């Protein structure tokens, strides 16, 4: 191989190596992008939201870095502050190589319970107010060109109209493959819920949605958060696998990756990203740049 060819190969190698190294350092120490794959955090986060997570928020653990599951060390360093109830946090699910995003509801020593759909923290019922309708519309992609029409409601792209006027309530719209809608009918359809403003004990206000107050997770035992652990719940209270379930339960403090900073991109799966002529009905422009909500 000539010296010229060797230099070209070396330059390509250096570009790939150092570019990858910079990306790893950036994602490990500063900001890491995630996309929202499920509706467990509706209405705060919707399926198709792409978020940045602040990695420095609560310090770093082995899970902050690639290959963290190798268990090279325990504990955290550079922890400037502790997670606060109400924060929206990305964490590593205990005993699994998968990340979840949920809202922090309880810290070590807190007791958490759900009774008849109401949240109790340390024995006191958490206030919720301002009930109003909320719609989760999961439509097959085959309907994207013709729209959805039933009674006085119509849906096209990212918008819902009632009696030919913009809907006076909040909603989320997602388009799924026709195959999913045929094989899992519950995955698609118009799901009605109620949106509330919940006020946590520290004064943080945020939105939740409830389909009913007597679902499987609306009545639970009393959970006492152990030392070094956290308790998380989704804002979509009837459709969230969170600390109320044995699959997640209490989350070790070291499993926290960081808090959600803002949404940098959002879409509803209406069409592929290359189909720019559909962007108007696909991209949720109003959500881009939206800061995390407490």
Image: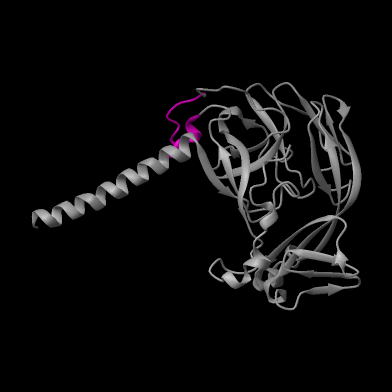
Q: Is residue 159 visible?
A: yes
Q: Is residue 132 left or right of residue 188?
A: right
Residue span colored magenta: 61-75
Q: Is residue 219 visible?
A: no
Check if residue 51 falls in the magenta segment. Answer: no
Check if residue 72 falls in the magenta segment. Answer: yes
Tell me what residue is drawn at x 65 percent, y 27 percent. 83
Image quadrant holding the N terminus, namely bottom left
Q: How far across and down, in percent of the image, does residue 40 sit?
A: 71, 49
Comparing 272 with 255, the one in front is 272
* Colouring style: one colour
Q: Is residue 58 left or right of residue 180?
A: left
Q: How far across and down, in percent of the image, does residue 98 sit?
A: 56, 45
Q: How far across and down, in percent of the image, does residue 278 sit?
A: 63, 71
Image quadrant holding the C terminus, namely top right
Give above or below for 280 relative to 14: below
Tell me what residue is drawn at x 55 percent, y 42 percent. 96
Give the image quarter of residue 20. Answer: top left
Give the image quarter of residue 116. Answer: top right
Tell me what residue is drawn at x 82 percent, y 24 percent. 122
Q: Main secondary structure of the magenta part?
A: loop
Tell me what residue is drawn at x 85 percent, y 41 percent. 197
Give the image quarter of residue 262. Answer: top right
Comparing 78 with 163, the one in front is 163
Q: How far across and down, in percent of the image, does residue 256 sit?
A: 58, 33
């Amino acid at each position: 191989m000539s010296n010229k060819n060797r230099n070209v190969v070396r330059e390509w190698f250096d570009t790939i190596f150092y570019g990858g190294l910079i990306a790893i350092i950036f994602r490990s120490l500063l900001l890491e992008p995630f996309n929202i794959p499920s509706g467990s955090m509706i209405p705060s986060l919707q399926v198709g939201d792409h978020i940045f997570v602040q990695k420095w928020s609560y310090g770093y653990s082995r899970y902050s870095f690639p290959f963290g599951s190798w268990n090279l060390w325990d504990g955290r360093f550079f922890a400037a502050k502790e997670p606060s109830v109400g924060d929206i946090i990305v964490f590593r699910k205990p005993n699994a190589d998968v990340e979840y995003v949920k809202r922090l509801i309880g810290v070590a020593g807190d007791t958490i319970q759900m009774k008849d759909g109401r949240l109790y923290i340390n024995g006191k019922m958490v206030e919720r107010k301002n009930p109003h309708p909320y719609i989760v519309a999961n439509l097959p992609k085959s309907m994207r060109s013709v729209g959805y029409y039933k009674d006085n409601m119509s849906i096209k792209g990212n918008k819902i109209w009632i009696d030919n006027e913009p809907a006076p309530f909040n909603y989320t719209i997602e388009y799924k493959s026709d195959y999913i809608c045929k094989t899992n009918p519950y995955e698609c359809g118009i799901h009605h819920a109620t949106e509330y403003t919940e006020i946590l004990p520290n004064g943080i206000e945020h939105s939740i949605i409830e389909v009913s107050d007597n679902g499987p997770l609306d009545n639970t035992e009393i959970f006492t958060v152990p030392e070094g652990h956290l308790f998380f719940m989704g804002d979509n209270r009837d459709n969230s696998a969170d600390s109320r379930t044995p699959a997640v339960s209490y989350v070790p403090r070291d499993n926290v990756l960081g808090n959600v900073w803002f949404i940098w991109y959002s879409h509803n799966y209406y069409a592929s990203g290359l189909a720019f002529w559909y962007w108007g009905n696909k991209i949720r422009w109003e959500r881009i740049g939206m800061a995390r909500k407490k």
